[in-house]
Image: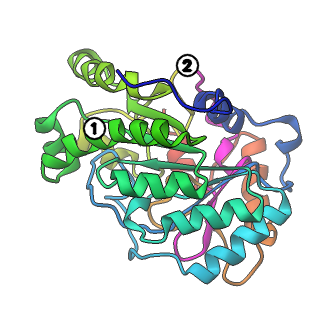
Amino acid sequence: MPSKPNGSDMKTFTITSRIDAVTRIPERYLAAELPAPRAVKIELTSQCNYRCGFCAHRLRMKDRGEMDRAFYERIVGEMAGAGVEELGVFYIGESFMCDWLPEAIGFAKQCGIRYVFLTTNGSLATRERVHACMKAGLDSLKFSMNNADEEQFVQIAAVKEKLFRDSIANLKRARAVRDSGGYNCGLYASSIQYDGEQQVRMQALVDEIRPFVDEHYWLPLYSMGALTTQREEELGYRPIAGNQGRIGALREPLPCWSAFTEGHITYDGKLSACCFDAGDKWVMADLNDVSFMQGWNSEAFVRLRRAHLKKDVTGTICESCVAYQ
C-alpha cells in the first residue's frame, strides 16, 4: 500500500471535478464568439507506441510528427496572455515520446498557466521521466488503463505484452516518485467501461491500481469523430455519439463542449474543433498564420458553433459524429 502524500499543500481536488467543469458549458460560453477557453490540449507529438483499436491515433489519416518548439513557445505565450488557465500537453499522441516534455511543462508554468495536465498510456512513463515532469511543475498525471490483461492488451494495443506490465509498474512508481519528492501533482487513472464479462475483467485491474492513484473514473467508448461505422465493425462495440464526457456526468451531444470550452492544437499548428480529430477534418484555423484568439474565433469556428447552438449540425463536419445514435 502506498504511503500518504507528503506536504501539506498536496492537491485535494478531484480530476473529475475539473473534467466536469470543462464538459459543462457555462452560460457565458454559449455563444458563437467566445473569450479564451478555460483549457487547451496541445500535441507535442502525434507519435504513439500503441496501436489501440479504440483510439483515434491508429485511424489517423495524416503524417505524424513533432511540434516545433518555437511555435510551442509562441502559442503558449499567446494562450496564457489571452486567459487560458489549463494546458494539456497532449492531444492524440503519446507525449512521453517527446524528449522535451519536461521543458514544455516548465515553460507553460513560467508563462502563467495555472494547471498543466498530461494523459499517458503509461508504458514510457519511467521513474526518471515522471520525476523530471513533476519537478518541472506538472499538476496532473493520468494513466489510461483500458486493457484487462496481457492477452487482451496484445490484441487491442497491437504491441508486445511487456508494455502492459510496464504501464502498471510505472503507475505504481509514479506514486512513489510523488510521495518521496513531495510533488504537488495529482495522480489519476481512467478506463473504458464495457458490459458483461469484459467489465468484470476490467474491475480486477482497477482494484489493483486504485490504491496508487487519487482517483479512478470510467469513460464510455467514444465514437472518435466521423469514423463511427468503421469502428463499430472493427471493435464489435457501439460507440456513443460525440464526446459526452465521463460515466456519471454524461452531457448531451449538442452543443458539443469540445467546440466551446476546450481548444485542441495539432503538432503542426492546426486548431481543431474536435477532441478526436484523426485527420484534420475539424480544422478551424492554421495557427502558423494567425494568433490563437484569431483562430479561436475564426469565421469557420463561429459558423460551426452557431449550428451547435441551434442543435442542428446537418451539413456540417459534426453531422456524422453527433448524429450517431
Q: Say which amino acid is labelled 2.
A: Gly
Q: Is residue 275 left or right of residue 40?
A: left
The prevailing secondary structure element of the residues shown in magenta is loop
**Up-down relation of residue 237 to residue 183 (above or below):** above
Tag shown at residue 36: none
Q: Say which amino acid is labelled 1.
A: Ile
Q: Is residue 230 left or right of residue 162?
A: right
Q: Earlier in the sequence, mark 2 or mark 1?
A: 1
Name the spot of residue 62 as percent of width and height, x first.
Answer: 40, 73
**Up-down relation of residue 135 to residue 218 (above or below):** below
Tell me the quadrant of the picture where the N terminus can be found.
Answer: top left
Residue stretch in magenta: 249-273
> What's the residue at 40%, 42% (across, down)?
174
Residue sitting nearer the eye, 146 or 273: 146
Q: Which residue is mark 1?
A: 168
Q: Which residue is mark 2?
A: 248
> What's the residue at 37%, 58% (across, down)?
57
**Up-down relation of residue 85 to residue 191 (above or below):** below
